[in-house]
Image: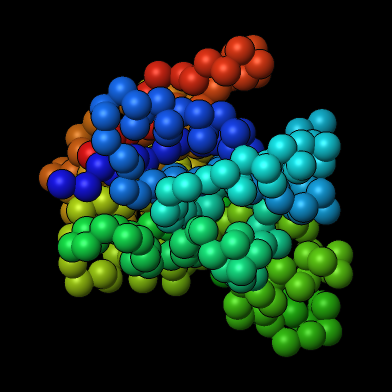
Amino acid sequence: MSLIAVTGDGHHQIGLAVEGLIRVENELGRPIAQVFSVGDLGLFLDEPDWGFLTGPKKYRKPEDSPKIRAAWKSWRWPISAIAGNHEPFNRLRNWDASYFSFKLDYIDAGELAHKVPGLRVAGLSGIYHPQEMEFMTALEARTMKRPPAETWPEMVHLTETNKISRSRLTYYKEFEVELLKSLDFAPNLLLLHDWPAKPEHIRQIYERRPEAEITSAIRPAFVCCGHHHMADDLVLGQSRILPLNIISTKELICRHIINPGWCALF
């Protein structure tokens, strides 16, 4: 049987992730056959990529890119991932596997490629915003005097030319939600960044939760997610939900301490 690891938010701590996965292999005495990520892996391999990190500028750390490159060079496991909301979206939404040295399989939405025979995995990149469920409205396109954007690469181009905010690359679209809801199989594993069920301590921001709609529609055996930086174990219908923790907090990273619940093993 293959050993599979699903990791929570890494936030560009690739070196610490390598250490953590090696620890798992040493403790269990067997190799990990496949790694999956629920997003916010943070592969900012080139310094300019940090310009696509949304949020306060204090979180942009181009000086960390050399360490990320070195850790990625040492990465030895097949890894398949969705995006979270803090990523080099210029690289993910305009996908080129060669940029990641063909080590990473990624998808915006749909069935995810991996190396484990017989395993069916689906995923959805990004998070929800009710006003960002389409690439661009007709009114917005007319205002910009251009045809409407219809693909992620077109949206990346608009951000690179400062026509729209880079934060818009973080939000999934309605057609992607519907694509997953219409899958004709029940995945063994569904990867989402946000939870299908609202965490108890989080105030409900929006009435709709598309992650719950997807889970209820296709009934995966397991759902792994991240985003809220805490581990839990929930049930939604016929699906077991395993939210995962952030790899480490700011206070613990320098001590190479990995939070419990960062990695789920199958």
Most distant residue in the right direction: 162
Front one among 105 and 183: 105
Q: Quadrant of residue 152?
A: bottom right
Q: Residue 133: where, in percent of width, then height?
A: 54, 63
* Position of residue 152 in the picture relative to residue 37 (left or right): right
Q: Residue at x 53, y 16 (%)?
A: 257
Front one among 244 and 71: 71
Q: Residue at x 62, y 19 (%)?
A: 253
Front one among 153 and 130: 153
Q: Quadrant of the C terminus?
A: top left
| Picture mark count | 0
Q: Residue at x 83, y 53 (%)?
A: 48
* Position of residue 96 in the picture relative to residue 246 (left or right): right
Most distant residue in the bottom direction: 147
Above or below: residue 45 compared with residue 20: below
Can residue 93 be seen at all in this image of the molecule?
no
Front one among 22 and 131: 22
Can residue 118 be seen at all in this image of the molecule?
yes
Q: Residue at x 50, y 29 (%)?
A: 19
Q: Residue 131: where, in percent of width, then height?
A: 59, 58
Q: Residue 62: where, in percent of width, then height?
A: 81, 41
* Position of residue 30 in the picture relative to residue 36 (left or right): left
Coloring basis for residues: rainbow
Above or below: residue 89 compared with residue 6: below
Q: Residue 59: where, in percent of width, then height?
A: 76, 33
